C-alpha cells in the first residue's frame, strides 16, 4: 500500500516520489493540517532557515503556512549573527521573521539569548569580567527589548547543563558564576515583560540532567525571578525514544508550576556513537554511517511512524501541561542532522520528505486525531 522511491542523480539532484493510500492529497490539497488537527491541544511549530524566512523557497512557504502555527529561527537570532560586533547589531533577518509571523498569524519563539555556542568572536576575546557583564546585559536588553510585545516567547538560556546535571563550563559560568542563568531571566523579564520565558536544553528528560534542570529552575524561582517553562529539545533516535523518562520529566517540570515545550523535535534515522545534541561533538566520516544515501527502507519509515505516533499519544495524554511541539526543520532535506555530527549524510528525521511530501510518520500523527 505504501511505496518509497528516492534516487540521487549524477548531478546530485534528489528525485523522490511516494505512493500512499488513495485518499492522500498533495501539499495544497490536504483535507486538514497538523495545526488544525491539534488546535485544541498545543501549538505545532517548525524551525525556519534563512531562505524560508525570506520566503524564497515557495514549496516550503506553502507548507509552513498550511501546517504550522509557531516558528523558531534556526540561527538568525543567535548572538554571532544578531550581535556581530560590540557596538553593532544586525536585526535584518530577525525583523523579517517577526514580520513573517505577524503577517501569517504564526507565533514566533526567539532562539536564543544566552548560549555558549555561536557567540560572536569579540565576546570570546573579552578578558575583563566587568566588560563581559556589560556585553551580557547590553545584549539581552537590546535584543529582548527590541522584540518586546512582538514575539510570543524566548529561549532565554540554552544548554547550560552537562549530562550529569552540573553546570557546563562555559564562558558565562567562567565570567559570571552560576548566577548567570538567574540574571539572564531577570534582565529578559524586565526588557520584555509580556513574553514567555523558557530554559531550553537537550537530554533534560534524562534523570541526572533532569535533576540539574530542576535545581536550576528552583534557583531562578527562589530569587523571585519569572521563568515560565522548560523546553525539552527532543532530539531522539529511531527505536530508542525514552518514553518513560519523557513522561517523568513532563510531570516533574509541571510540578514546579512550569509549562513544558518540545522545542526541537526530530527522530534520527542514522547511526552514531553518542547520544545528545552537543554541536561541539563530531564523528569521523565513514560510508557505513551513511547507509541510506540512495534511499531508505520502508520498514524504517514505518518504525519512525510508530515512534512519532507513540510520542504524540504521550503529548496528548499531557496536553494540559504541554503548550508547544516544534519540529527542528520543515523537511528532511533541511535537517541539521544531514551535516552533524558527520557532514554530508542523508538523514530522514522529520514528517516531510525532501520533496515536501508527507511521510508515514505524518499520517501516523494525523491519524491520532481522526
Image (tube, rainbow, N blue to C red):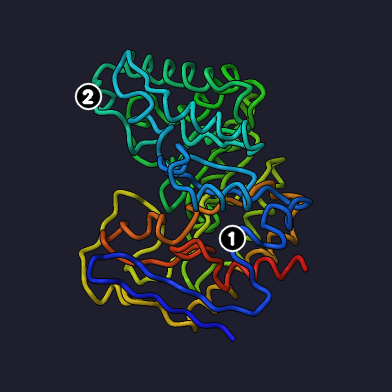
Q: Position of residue 273 (x, y in %)?
A: 32, 68
Is residue 209 at least partly visible in the picture?
A: no
Toward the viewer: 156 or 85?
85
Q: Earlier in the sequence, mark 2 or mark 1?
A: 1
- Along the line of sight, which residue is nearer the eye, 189 or 169? 189
- Check the image and report above or below for 116 versus 122: below
Residue sitting at 33 percent across and 49 percent down? Answer: 279
Secondary structure of residue under mark 2: helix
What's the residue at 46%, 63% (across, down)? 355
Can residue 5 be seen here?
A: yes
- The C terminus: image quadrant: bottom right
Q: Of the numbered discs in the image, which one, if any, rests on residue 125?
A: 2
Mark 1: few, some, or many residues within 10 Å (few <14, many ≥20)? some
For residue 195, side relative to residue 234 (left or right) = right
Q: Which residue is mark 1?
A: 27
Q: Nearer the viewer, mark 2 or mark 1?
A: 1
Amino acid at each position: 500500500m505504501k511505496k518509497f522511491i528516492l534516487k540521487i542523480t549524477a548531478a546530485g539532484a534528489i528525485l523522490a516520489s511516494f505512493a500512499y493510500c488513495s485518499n492522500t492529497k498533495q501539499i495544497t490539497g490536504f483535507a486538514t493540517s497538523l495545526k488544525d488537527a491539534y488546535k485544541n491541544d498545543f501549538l505545532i511549530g517548525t524551525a525556519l532557515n534563512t531562505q524560508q524566512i525570506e520566503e524564497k523557497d515557495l514549496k516550503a512557504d506553502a507548507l509552513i503556512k498550511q501546517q504550522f502555527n509557531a516558528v523558531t529561527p534556526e540561527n538568525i537570532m543567535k548572538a554571532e549573527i544578531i550581535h556581530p560586533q560590540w557596538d553593532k547589531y544586525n536585526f535584518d533577518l530577525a525583523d523579517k521573521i517577526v514580520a513573517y509571523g505577524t503577517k501569517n498569524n504564526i507565533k514566533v519563539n526567539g532562539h536564543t539569548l544566552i548560549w555558549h555556542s555561536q557567540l560572536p568572536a569579540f565576546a570570546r576575546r573579552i578578558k575583563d569580567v566587568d566588560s563581559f557583564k556589560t556585553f551580557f546585559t547590553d545584549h539581552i536588553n537590546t535584543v529582548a527589548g527590541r522584540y518586546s510585545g512582538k514575539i510570543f516567547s524566548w529561549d532565554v538560556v540554552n544548554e547550560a547543563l552537562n549530562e550529569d546535571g552540573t553546570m557546563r563550563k562555559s564562558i558565562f559560568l567562567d565570567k559570571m558564576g552560576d548566577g548567570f542563568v538567574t540574571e539572564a531571566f531577570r534582565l529578559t523579564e524586565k526588557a520584555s515583560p509580556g513574553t514567555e520565558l523558557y530554559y531550553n536544553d537537550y537530554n533534560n528528560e534524562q534523570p541526572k540532567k533532569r535533576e540539574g534542570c530542576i535545581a536550576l529552575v528552583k534557583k531562578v524561582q527562589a530569587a523571585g525571578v519569572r521563568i515560565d517553562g522548560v523546553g525539552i529539545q527532543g532530539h531522539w533516535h529511531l527505536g530508542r525514544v525514552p518514553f518513560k523518562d519523557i513522561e517523568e520529566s513532563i510531570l516533574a517540570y509541571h510540578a514546579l508550576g512550569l509549562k513544558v515545550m518540545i522545542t526541537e523535535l526530530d527522530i534520527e534515522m542514522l547511526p552514531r556513537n553518542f547520544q545528545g545534541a552537543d554541536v561541539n561533538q563530531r564523528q569521523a566520516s565513514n560510508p557505513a554511517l551513511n547507509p541510506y544515501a540512495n534511499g531508505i527502507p520502508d520498514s524504517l519509515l514505518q518504525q519512525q511512524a510508530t515512534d512519532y505516533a507513540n510520542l504524540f499519544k504521550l503529548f496528548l495524554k499531557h496536553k494540559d501541561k504541554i503548550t508547544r511541539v516544534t519540529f527542528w526543520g520543515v523537511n528532511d532535506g533541511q535537517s541539521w542532522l544531514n551535516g552533524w555530527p558527520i557532514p554530508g549524510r542523508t538523514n530522514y528525521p522529520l514528517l516531510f520528505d525532501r520533496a515536501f511530501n508527507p511521510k508515514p510518520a505524518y499520517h501516523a500523527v494525523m491519524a491520532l486525531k481522526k
